[in-house]
Image (spheres, grey):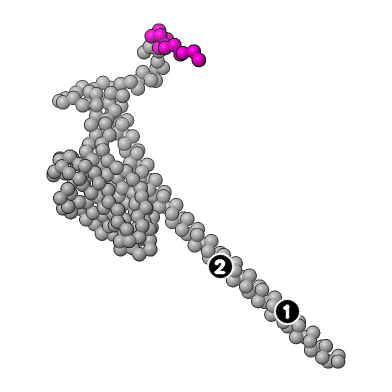
């Protein structure tokens, strides 16, 4: 098997050979932010169950928690935020959705716990988004002091902020769509069961009427036979 020869520098594409749209995107790469640490998760919480999530948070870090119950029961759940020493930073009972923002006063392991212990048979589907820290842009925007951005760089920053808003709206509408879908499927199952029950009841009535009419004719036939004898 012949070895593959490396491409010579002349064969590599130069900046002049790159497509013009790609050249326009190069300045925006310098403005891409470093995403903040965090967790975004959708999970199932069974009845009489409790589930906790843990993160190692630095001192002074800003934490943002958003959660919402998508499906199950009365769409409620207990939520609690605990600090490294076990102190309660946030506690709400039977909430459908809520948000909480706090700043870590010390470094350590922080916990977010969701509880469905008050429910005996309803499973819940819970969505939460736990963001730790702020976005740190790189490139020119990451330098200290005032920075003069070009018109294209300013436009890239504006587009980035608009895209963040779009992502937030998309997440919100996805949660609403999942909740509406669950309600529609639940209603469809109930309608299906009701239709099956009505069908069985109708069949039983038809069979009963046929048997009743058959018994009437059988009695008449037996009576006429006795008279003939």
Measuring from the top left, give residue 30's x and y in whole percent: 28, 23
Secondary element at tag 1 = helix
| Residue for point 60% across, 67% down | 199
Where residue 116 sits, quadrant-wise, is bottom left
Q: How far apart are marks 2 and 1 (CA)?
A: 26 Å
For the C terminus, the quadrant is: bottom right
For marks 2 and 1 on the same chain, the one whose residue lies earlier in the sequence: 2
| Residue for point 27% across, 44% down | 130
Measuring from the top left, give residue 52's x and y in whole percent: 27, 51
Apparent side of residue 4 relative to residue 135 in the rendered image (left or right) = right
Residue sitting farthest toward the top: 10
Judge whether residue 95 can be spotted in this image.
no
Residue 6 in magenta stretch: yes
Residue 40 in magenta stretch: no
Where residue 14 sits, quadrant-wise, is top left
Where residue 107 sits, quadrant-wise, is top left
Residue on which the image places disc 2: 197
Q: Which residue range is magenta in the image?
A: 1-12
| Residue for point 57% across, 68% down | 198
Which numbered tag is attached to residue 193?
none
| Residue for point 27% across, 26% down | 31
Q: Is the magenta stretch mostly helix, strand or loop?
A: loop
Q: Residues within 10 Å of mark 1 (few under 14, many from 20)?
A: few
């Amino acid at each position: 098997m012949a070895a593959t020869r490396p491409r010579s520098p002349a064969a590599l594409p130069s900046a002049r050979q790159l497509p013009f749209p790609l050249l326009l995107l190069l300045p925006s790469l310098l403005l891409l932010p470093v995403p903040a640490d965090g967790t975004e998760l959708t999970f199932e919480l069974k009845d009489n169950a409790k589930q906790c999530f843990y993160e190692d948070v630095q001192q002074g870090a800003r934490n943002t928690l958003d959660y919402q119950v998508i499906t199950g029961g009365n769409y409620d759940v207990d939520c609690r935020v605990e600090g490294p020493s076990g102190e309660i930073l946030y506690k709400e009972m039977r909430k459908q959705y809520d948000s909480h923002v706090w700043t870590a006063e010390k470094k350590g392991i922080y916990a977010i716990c969701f509880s469905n212990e008050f429910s005996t048979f309803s499973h819940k589907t819970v969505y939460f988004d736990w963001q730790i820290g702020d976005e740190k842009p790189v490139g020119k925007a990451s330098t200290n002091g005032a920075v003069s951005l070009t018109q294209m760089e300013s436009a890239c920053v504006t587009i980035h902020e608009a895209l963040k808003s779009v992502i937030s709206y998309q997440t919100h509408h996805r949660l609403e769509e999942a909740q509406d879908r669950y309600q529609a499927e639940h209603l469809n199952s109930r309608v299906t069961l009701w239709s099956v029950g009505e069908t069985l009841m109708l069949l039983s009535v038809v069979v009963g009427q046929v048997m009743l009419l058959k018994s009437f004719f059988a009695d008449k036939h037996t009576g006429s036979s006795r008279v003939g004898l």
